[in-house]
Image (cartoon, rainbow, N blue to C red):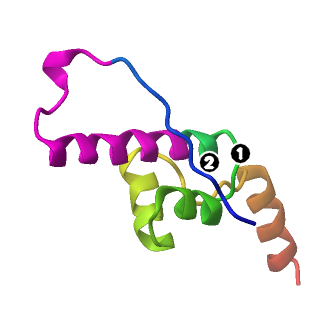
Amino acid sequence: MTVIPIQVTVDLPEDEVPRAAAGRRALARELRLLWVLDRVRRGRVSIGKGAQLAGMGRLPFLAAMTDHGMAAIAYPAEELAYEIDLLTAR
């Protein structure tokens, strides 16, 4: 499956946007990462797909998730307690 990228225009305050092209590219990467992290947080894409969409390896993407306060493993405490009970009952 071929992915065809699209461009989206975002209005930002002029004094907050870098003037240099390299700074603008860094801003574009940061905005893309934030968009992908939100998609993962909402459960719309997996962590692996998120890493791919962000153009990162899985470990750097997991680190980015942690940097943005996201848990890399979403495992409800109740399920963990249940499974621990099952394992310790043996």
Range shown magenta: 12-37
| Amino acid of disc 1 | Gly
Q: How many marks?
A: 2
**67 w.r.t. 24: above or below:** below
Is residue 30 shown left or right of residue 37? Answer: left
Residue 3 magenta: no
Q: CA distance from mark 1 to mark 2?
A: 5 Å
Q: Which residue lies under the disc numbered 2?
A: 40
Residue 33 magenta: yes
Residue 63, given in percent of the width and then of the height, sits at: 40, 62
- Which quadrant would the C terminus be assigned to in this image? bottom right
- Which quadrant would the N terminus be assigned to in this image? bottom right
Residue 43's label in the rendered image is 1
Q: Quadrant of residue 23?
A: top left
Is residue 28 shown left or right of residue 70? Answer: left
Q: Quadrant of residue 60?
A: bottom left
Q: Are marks 1 and 2 in contact (CB under 8 Å)?
A: yes
* Residue found at x 18% / y 23%: 16
Residue 19, given in percent of the width and then of the height, sits at: 11, 32
| Dominant secondary structure (helix, strand or loop) of the stretch shown in magenta | helix
Nearest the viewer among 6 and 54 is 6
**59 w.r.t. 38: above or below:** below
Tell me the SS state at disc 2.
helix
Is residue 52 shown left or right of residue 84? Answer: left
Nearest the viewer among 50 and 85 is 50
| Amino acid of disc 2 | Val
- Name the residue furthest bottom: 90
Q: Quadrant of residue 38?
A: top right
* Residue found at x 35% / y 48%: 29
Residue 76, given in percent of the width and then of the height, sits at: 73, 51
